[in-house]
Image: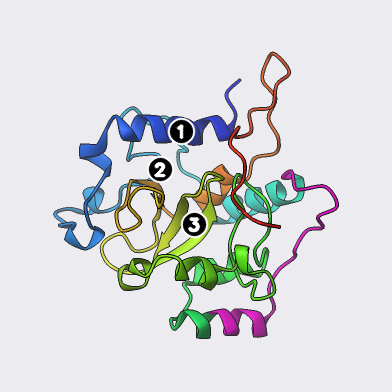
Amino acid sequence: MIGRHDHMHAFRLRARMSRNACRWDDVRSVTVTAEPQARPAADSCIPGGVARLGAVNTEDLVAQVHDLLTRVPRPPDEAAAGGADDAEIADLARRLALTLPPPLVAWLRVCRGDLIGPGGVFGARADRPPIDMEHRRSYHPGFIDRGWLPVAGDGCGNTYVLITHGPLDGRVAFIETTTDPDRIDYLVASDLWHFLRFLLPARQVNEDGHSTQRSCSPSIPT
């Protein structure tokens, strides 16, 4: 059985074979010609639909993410971070100098940033800079002009970003920051909640009894 994490790997492999469909030199150069083309998503960006989700209402999707969050593997002796309060969310918005998108605010109230997933999820963590969204954005000044908010790492030094303005507003994209931090490598999901459902699987085990988690070491200091 193929786990959700395998699908994320399949996304990357198929996307790199399909760059004409899913890669742009600069997100600001995208021309919107029709609504279906303007909204590429994780289940439509890659020809063949490697991880097609189908129709899922938002309430069910959020519930699934909440459930995954309770079961996702985390480092030994690392307690769940919990959600951000109003003061932490306001502080993050002030440091980022923007109004946070409602889906991101809703997610931060559930998880304020934690050492989970392949490379951590970033949020309102002024107390822990390696997983603080504003701190992670400061590594890549081009993210500010493009409206890209780093929401997670891939465990190999690259970044998943939430796009906050322009024709791809609300989508999540993968930026291969180790190669070119100013270019979208491919789109991952049509919105933040779909992305989180893929990012946070419970530990999967294949038929040989081996974990399907990423083999490269997380790039997040503890």
Check contact, mark 1 vs mark 2: CB within 8 A.
Answer: yes
Name the kind of residue labelled 3 in the image: Leu
Gap in Å between the C-alphas at discs 3 and 2?
Answer: 11 Å
Residue 70 located left or right of residue 33: right
- Name the N-terminal-most of marks 3 and 2: 2
As helix, strand or loop, the secondary structure at mark 3 comes to helix
Name the kind of residue labelled 1 in the image: Ala
Residue 57 in view in this figure: no
Residues in magenta, as a range: 72-92
- Front residue of 182/94: it is 182
The location of residue 178, given as percent across then percent down, is 41, 49
Magenta segment: does it hold 200? no
Name the kind of residue labelled 2 in the image: Ala
For disc 3, the marked residue is 192
For disc 1, the marked residue is 51
As helix, strand or loop, the secondary structure at mark 1 comes to loop
Secondary structure mostly taken by the magenta-highlighted segment of the chain: loop
- Front residue of 109/25: it is 25
Give the residue displayed 48% in from the left and 76% down from the top.
100
Q: Is residue 42 above or below residue 3?
A: below
Q: Which mark is residue 42?
A: 2
Q: Which mark is residue 143?
A: none
Q: Is residue 141 above or below residue 11?
A: below
As helix, strand or loop, the secondary structure at mark 2 comes to loop
User: Dividing the image into 4 quarters, which one contains the C terminus?
Assistant: bottom right
